[in-house]
Image (cartoon, rainbow, N blue to C red):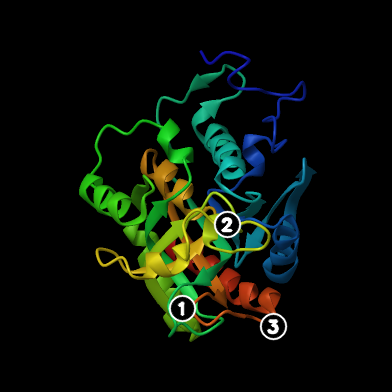
Amino acid sequence: MINESELIITQSGRIYHLDLLPEEVADSILIVGDPDRSTHISKSFFEKTLFSRSHRGLITNTGTVNGKNITVTTSGMGTPSLEIVLNELAALKFIDLKTRRKNETFKPFDIIRVGTSGGLREETELGTLIISDYAIGLDNTGFFYKRNENPYTKLEGELEKFLGIKPYISRFNKDVIQALEESCKELGVPYKIGATASNSGFFANQGRELLLEPSIAEIDQKLSKFGALNIENMEMEASFLAYFSSLLPIRSGCICVAIANRAKNTFAKDPTKLVEAASKVAIRALERLG
């Protein structure tokens, strides 16, 4: 049995941070960083809203799209916040909150991250949707979770020598990648598939210099030149989503719109509209996954 200090449940039987009950979360989940984006997506795409909850700045909405139940929830900014949200979503699916025991069998579920990112390559037009294949963690969140086998040891070593930071590398589910690609083609939106680097912050961590000099100059351009992987974009959440879900029966994927081109130093005029296209693709992919 999992003790009270490890699995915190409120007096009303809800998971602590998300303030949710298991029946309030669908088996198909979109996860977004911006809480307002959760509300916007649900208002834009749900035929019917079944449930809404806002707690600690984390907004969750569950509704129907073409008769399919889909949950849109918030990860917050960065992998530390995402770590909390993913663990609680997994607990709602894989643990009996009343007995505090793991279920005897785990029913798989699907999560797709919809987000924004900076494109690292000069030829990537603003508004391009980038489907993540590999996910590269330049944060440290994944290091606190043991994996028994690591097929990416060589890649991690090469990138550590190249960049001077010890990374953790994982891959998203191939079925989700395929569903996202097919949905992009069907909807006629521009897309690319490649590796995504996740940083532990937004400014110096990603090579931006405002008041203080970054310790790794032009990390964005260095990542784009790493020959062993085609690193297409940089953001702050994909790494831990791919890593965590690879250790559990969770099919996950990530699609981020390039709202900045770091090589050209340009930024999109209307990011909200571009995110809506990515959301539409992700919802269509969840429908494909069934």
- Circles 3, 2 touching at the beta carbon (< 8 Å): no
Q: Amino acid at mark 3?
A: Lys
Q: Are marks 1 and 3 in contact (CB under 8 Å)?
A: no
- Of mark 1 and mark 3, the one earlier in the sequence is 1
Viewer-nearest of discs 3 and 2: 2
In depth, the one of 277 and 259 nearer the eye is 259
Disc number at residue 204? 2
Residue drawn at x 69%, y 83% is 269
- Residue at (66%, 51%) from the top-left corner? 74
Element at badge 3? loop
Measure how far apart labels 1 and 3 are at the Cα level.
22 Å
Q: Is residue 132 above or below residue 125?
A: above
**Quarter residue 53 falls in:** top right
Residue 163 image position (x, y, % from top left): 36, 55
Residue 13 x/y as whole percent: 71, 25
Which SS class for mark 1?
helix
Q: CA distance from mark 1 to mark 2?
A: 33 Å
State the SS at label 2.
Answer: helix
